[in-house]
Image (spheres, coloured by chain):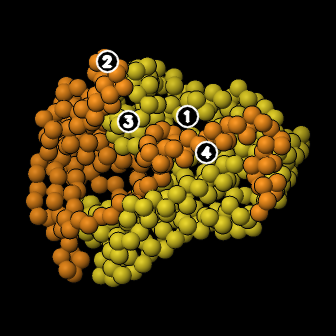
Amino acid sequence: MAIRNTAAFRPVITRTVVSFFLFILLFRLYSHVLPFQLKGPLLTKIDLDPLLWLYKALNIGEVIVANQIASCVFTIFLFASAVLCFAYPLKKLFIIVFTILFNILALTFNLYLTHNTHLLIGMSIILFCFWPAKNDVFELLWDGMRYFICWIYLSSLLWKCINGSFFQHDFGIVSFKANIAWILYENPYSVRSAAYGFFLHHPAIANFGAKLIFIAEGFFVIGFFTKRYDTFLAVLIIGIHSTLWFFSDVLFIELFVFVFCFISPDTWMRLEKNMSGLKMLSATTSLK
Amino acid sequence: MKFNQTYFHDVFKRSKWCFAVIVSFIVFIFFANLKRFNASPFSIWNVYSYPNKKDSFSIYSLRYNHNKAYNLPELWNHHKRMMFYYTIEWYHRCAANNFQDPLKQSGYNFINKRGVKRGWLIKKIYNTSDEIRSYPVWLKKYMASNIDEKIDSISVYKMLVYYTNNGELKVAKTNKLLSVH
């Protein structure tokens, strides 16, 4: 399978991806989960994770979480480096700084959330594709990231087969009941609870739906053999996580970043044309 | 499919160091999966992979300022409520373990097995009893900024719930986990 010709569109790809990062950072600001908003938590949870051990050994948390001034400075640098990456998409220094800061953010979030979530992992890894100075190498990494995403979803199905949830006939309804219990308890008369009531009365649909999601993850195997169905795979990513939100109350919005890796060079070309069209329009308007 | 038609062939042809990085990455991922070594940022993608056979479930409920419920079910508030719902579960596990970090012993064994005596590292990595005990006060402070309201008091309850045959949610047991005034 030939490597997609994306080198020429590196600026527009970088800008689009960084825009998504900025959106996520703003969403986190709204959600009160940026380090300076955490009010200096002390409780952490670390299992056998070398990077988190290093984080603790180097006292990073004491600087960017416990110290309010340092925490604010960290957040300003994080946003500023993202904006600079958008403005200068080919400047290596900005993307490297942003990657380091974003990875620190991801570690901080998981550490003080006391749960090793997968929310920011995709975003943490994808930034490394923009590190090479040569556009040609970027193209290789960008395509490699696409394969890695196919592996992520396929391995997710494989783990369900290995660990057994795939073979549990009522996994869908049991998992559904566990995750939505608090919503039913706190909001018994809401529209959402009424919708959940339907699935509680028809557990077979919830069980069948869970199996469909598992199989949808398996579809990513085709990504290893052809790029013809990339649009379908991109839609699947959105579909899987939207369904998970409704049935499991888990919002993996950060993983939507994977969608960008399944966009074809033709689409990037169109987007670039539209962007340069917009630029020309604004230049003409300002001249008038 | 022949090797010269694959992604790896193209990478090898165009950049040797890039090929080395990608192969190292794949080897690491392979062994991490094989050993079930769930480390940042190369986590194993095994969410929802274990069977779930429960009949009853635990839920946490936070009440503040005279029994006002902390209740943000909206899609856009998902991340806002995360800090409470995840940390309370871990705090409860630590508190139930006599205010000791339940993972401390396994970390200690892991380090000791490798012949490294690093008591300071263990002290640094895992929660001390004082850190665990300070959680309720932190939670009150954090919730005040999270909901942007002045908070005089908070209480957290843990409920054991179950579903009746017609899908109705029932509370079997309620425990008060913490209270701060």
Q: Are marks 2 and 1 in contact (CB under 8 Å)?
A: no
Circle 2: element type: loop
Of residue A287 and residue A151, the one placed in the foreground of this image is: A151
Q: Residue at x 67, y 53 (%)?
A: A146
Q: Which residue matches tag 4?
A: B26
- Check residue A102 in the rendering and tell me which mark sits there, or answer none: 1
First in sequence: mark 4 vs mark 2: 4
Name the amino acid type tagged 4: Ile
Q: Position of residue B5 (x, y in %)?
A: 81, 57
Please name the amino acid that badge 1 sits on.
Phe
| Mark 1 chain | A
| Horizontal and vertical percent position of residue A206 | 38, 76
Separation (CA) of disc 3 from disc 1: 22 Å
Q: Is residue A55 above or below residue B103?
A: above
Q: Where, quadrant-wise, is the N terminus of chain A in this rendering?
A: bottom right
Indicate which label's residue lies in the foreground, 2 or 3.
2
The answer to whether A106 is drawn above or below residue A76 in the figure is: below
Query: Which chain identifier belongs to the yellow chain?
Result: A
Instruction: Count residues near mark 4 (Cα–Cα under 10 Å), then give few for <14, some for 14-19, many for 20+.
Output: few
Q: The residue under label 3 is which amino acid type? A: Leu
**Mark number displayed over residue A203:** none
Residue at the image position 43 percent from the left and 47 percent from the top: B36
Disc 4 to disc 3, C-alpha distance: 21 Å
